[in-house]
Image (cartoon, rainbow, N blue to C red):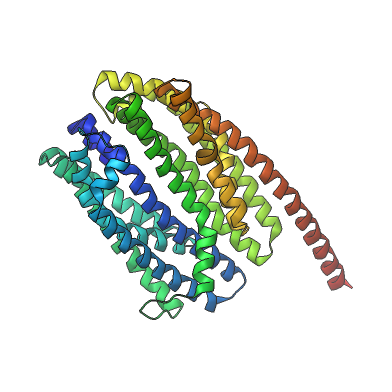
Amino acid sequence: MVDTIFVGRVVGGNGIGALVVIFPIQRIIVALSLMIAIGSSTALARSNGEKDYEMSGKIIKNGFTLSFLIMIPMTLLTYIFRDQILLMLGTSKNILPYAHDYLSLVIFGSTFLCLTIFISNIMIALGNRKVSLISTSIGAVLNIIIDYILVVKMSMGVKGAAIATSVSQIAGFIYAYYHFRKIKKNFNLSSGFQLDKVIWSSIILVGFSAFIVEAEDGILMAVLNNLLLNHVGDTGIIVLGVISKVYMFMFITILGISSAMQPIAAYNLGAGNYKRLRNIVRKTAIYSFITSTILWAGGLVFTEQLISVFVKEKDIILESVKAFRIMIAAFPLISIYYMSIYYFQALGKARKSFLVAIFRQLIIMLPLAIIMVKVLNLGAMGVWISYPISDVIASVTSYIMIKDEGYKLDDKVKKQKEEEKINKSYVLD
């Protein structure tokens, strides 16, 4: 978002277009990072709940090793084949030079970003939320400062934005790793790598749905970029870039609430505290819906002001305002959708979590957008309409699925209450 604001206002539409076509690559990187981080933190929370601290140490070490083994080869391959990848993602001749410059530099912060996400989630699973918040804040603030210096003052354009992002990711990692060293001491973790097939496969299996949630966004954007480029042109890609950044801010807020619930729910499941688990799920659903409704109302009322933060061209602002209001028409409903994904992860139901994760964007929205643009010839409007339709269908489906799990949880709570009564009467006797 920060890079888009500075690039959009200083470089212009082609600069935003470059960031849009690179967005799928960034989402895949974040997706892989979250797969490792969520899979590791879920397993860690469950093993801590079971008081199996030896296993907790092994989980941390395996997750750390996976981060290196996945991200370093991906960084090198992306850099080597960057132009071929950009053309495949729907980059036009006008946008390609900007995209090339940005990707050539920003890709080298990927490993640091992955490790920061991993460490942050591990710390959250252990009850320390400050590390995640502060490391993210350090990166965000530093990104803004360096963007202003390099993009605005030194007129370095997209190259300056890429440098700002990479440096901020490295700074966030340094802070996170400083605190991670304390965890290494607590769990007696030795230096070096470790891979246990049972552990790393479990991490990937549980975290795979988190990967899909992030990766499908990148896949969707890549397809939409190609659709818009072929049927609307560069303007369609630029509008998508602007509104997707505002939309990203909104749904990541809901994603944050849901993902914060996940390690707490996993811990209480491991500890057998079903009453608290049910209470956590209910509160998360309420808070998530209220937050999404507030964001939705703010987005509808202040649409033009939000869009104007990114671009100055009036024609792009007008088109973006119309598209964004259509895009978020059913936004409050997706709170239950995202919560269900992380709830199923916490329960260790990887298959169900995976199916819900791919349902909204890959199963519904992707074919729907293609049909509306290519078959019904609705152009860009077909892309914008596909968002609320998919939100409604996915949210209703996930509500039905989570309701079914709720009945099972209620039965466990009843049994737990009965056992507590028996224990109390036994003590009194």
Residue at image position (44%, 68%) is: 63
Residue at image position (39%, 54%) is: 133
Decide which of 306, 159 is in the foreground and name it. 159
Q: Is residue 131 visible?
A: yes
From the top left corner, tell me how far across and down residue 222 is, in percent: 37, 39
From the top left corner, tell me how far across and down residue 57 is, in percent: 48, 75
Decide which of 399, 410 is in the foreground and name it. 399
Q: Quadrant of residue 110?
A: bottom left
Q: Is residue 275 above or below residue 216?
A: below
For this orientation, the residue located farthest to the left is: 154
Q: Is residue 340 above or below residue 117?
A: above
Q: Quadrant of residue 265?
A: bottom right
Residue at image position (39%, 81%) is: 190
From the top left corner, tell me how far across and down residue 140 is, in percent: 30, 48
From the top left corner, tell me how far across and down residue 86 is, in percent: 27, 43
Q: Quadrant of residue 275?
A: bottom right
Residue at image position (40%, 63%) is: 119
Query: Split into 4 quadrants, where in the image is the C terminus?
Result: bottom right
Does residue 423 appear to the left or right of 98 in the view shown? right
